[in-house]
Image: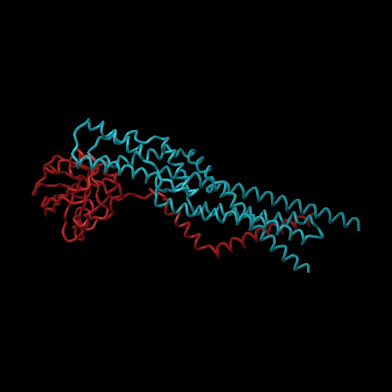
Amino acid sequence: MKIILNIIKYIAIVICTCCIIAVVILNIASSTILNKEYMLEKLDEANYYEKIKEEIQNSFENYIGQSGLDESVIENIVTTEQIKKDTNTIINNLYDGTNVTINTEEIATNLKNNIETSLGGIKLTTTQQKAIEEYIAKIEAQYKETMSHTEYEGQINNVVRKVNTYKEQINKFSVIGIAVSVFIILACNYKNLLNTLAHVGISLTSSGLFYIIVRSFIDSKIKVSNILVLNNAVSDTIKNILNNILENILNTGIILFVIGILMIIIGNIITNIRAENRKEQE
Amino acid sequence: MKKFIKATIINLIVALFIVIIILGGIKISLGQKIDEAILLVNQVAIKVDRTFEEKPTTIDTSSKRLQNYPEYGTQYATIEIPKIGIELPVYYGDTLEILKKGVGHSSGSYFPGEGGSIIYMGHNSKNVFRRFSELQIGNEIKVTTTYGEYNYKIYDMKLINETETDKLPIQDEKEILMVYTCYPFNNIGYATQRYVVYAELEE
């Protein structure tokens, strides 16, 4: 009977550990990459808006050489405020699936005005007018592309939607799993309920150790500081977010590990003292 | 006291054992996916190793193949077109960023001396190829690379659409230099046509 109880107890400890790992991972994800406000905050921290403005300006410059237009025509056609507004739109699209397209009307108007000023009112042929319209359309498309990288928007939105759908269910299931496994451990320790402290401590220590190992594994396999995705603005933001998540994983791991060890030590001390008292009484 | 230490050690061993079981379970069930994910991330986590010694580019004249190709984005030659008074740096690569600096060398084409199609491109701005219209058949183009000098003679000029890539064929039977720029030369706005100058190597 004792052996069966022990087996059940250790199975419950393993289940409890798995559920703690799941709950912690979901909480880290929910408060970081799945959190719209967190993303906006990180974009701000990484100075994303200014960096992306620079990228956009550089991408516009690529069209100047062959256009026959003066470089001044692309100056000040995009403002940081507009970039902020459009970034918000993109983030909303990604997280809420709003599917709102970026409005480039203001850029087109600013560019058109700059071109007209630069040309100094010279009379344009129909072909030239058409070429200018096409040029403006190219610049608008370039802005949209640098801002949102449309080919990834749908994919990211699908992933976010899927993760959000399963997140709540997994979280609920894990919390119930923790409660049930703790109850089973308690039931198995019916003769000495304080033993539960050490056994739950084992779960916490395991979870903590798991996160510390995972963090070390990621560190050894991936060089976050070398990540280069799309452009510097996006890369810096991704690096910032990944470093923050890895830091969260390590901190949570250390906290769980320390609490777990303390629970094991305290649980065992109490059990030991009680056993000695019982011995003395006998 | 002994009992307490023993119990604590056993509990810690159990904790470690559980971690091993969980990690083992993850490795068995998701190992391949994790490896793929790491590979994917490492594809974008570029590690630039600049500790190697850069060797100069040379050419094996018998096999007509370069040894130690120039690094992408670096200048490896200059192009000179005396007829229109041009001398410009040539960079290996064809990004718009490169074209801002000078003449780009299409990375899919051959290098001078390799005996195949060489494709160069440049903007039609005043300092680059705006005066292409003045070129005539028989005019010379000189390419001075870090491994040798090559002289080409213009034998044809064509106006093509930006999508007509078949007009810039890649072959390895004859050394042909194709230099193109946007057309019209003094256009305003987006140019959809390209003006190509074809030149053959002078033996």
Q: Position of residue B27 (x, y in %)?
A: 55, 63
Q: How many marks?
A: 0
Location of residue B129 by image quarter = top left
Q: Position of residue B6 (x, y in %)?
A: 75, 58
Look at the image and tell me in which quarter the C terminus of chain B lies.
bottom left
Q: Is residue A180 toward the left or the right of residue A71 in the image?
A: right
| Whether residue A262 is situated above or below residue B63 in the rendered picture | above
Colour in which chain B is drawn: red
A228 vs B2, nearest the viewer: A228
- Which chain is displayed in cyan in the rendered image? A
Look at the image and tell me in which quarter the N terminus of chain B lies.
bottom right
Residue furthest out toward the right: A282
Q: Residue at 25% of width from left, 33% of height from top?
A: A116
A268 vs A100, nearest the viewer: A100
Q: Is residue B43 toward the left or the right of residue A4 in the image?
A: left
Q: Residue at 67% of width from left, 54% of height from top?
A: A205
* Colour scheme employed for the rendering of this structure: by chain
Q: Position of residue A271 (x, y in %)?
A: 80, 55
Q: Position of residue B186 (x, y in %)?
A: 18, 39
Q: Is residue A184 toward the left or the right of residue B102 in the image?
A: right
Q: Is residue A204 toward the left or the right of residue B196 in the image?
A: right
| Whether residue A52 is situated above or below residue B18 in the rendered picture | above
| Whether residue A233 is situated above or below residue A181 in the rendered picture | above
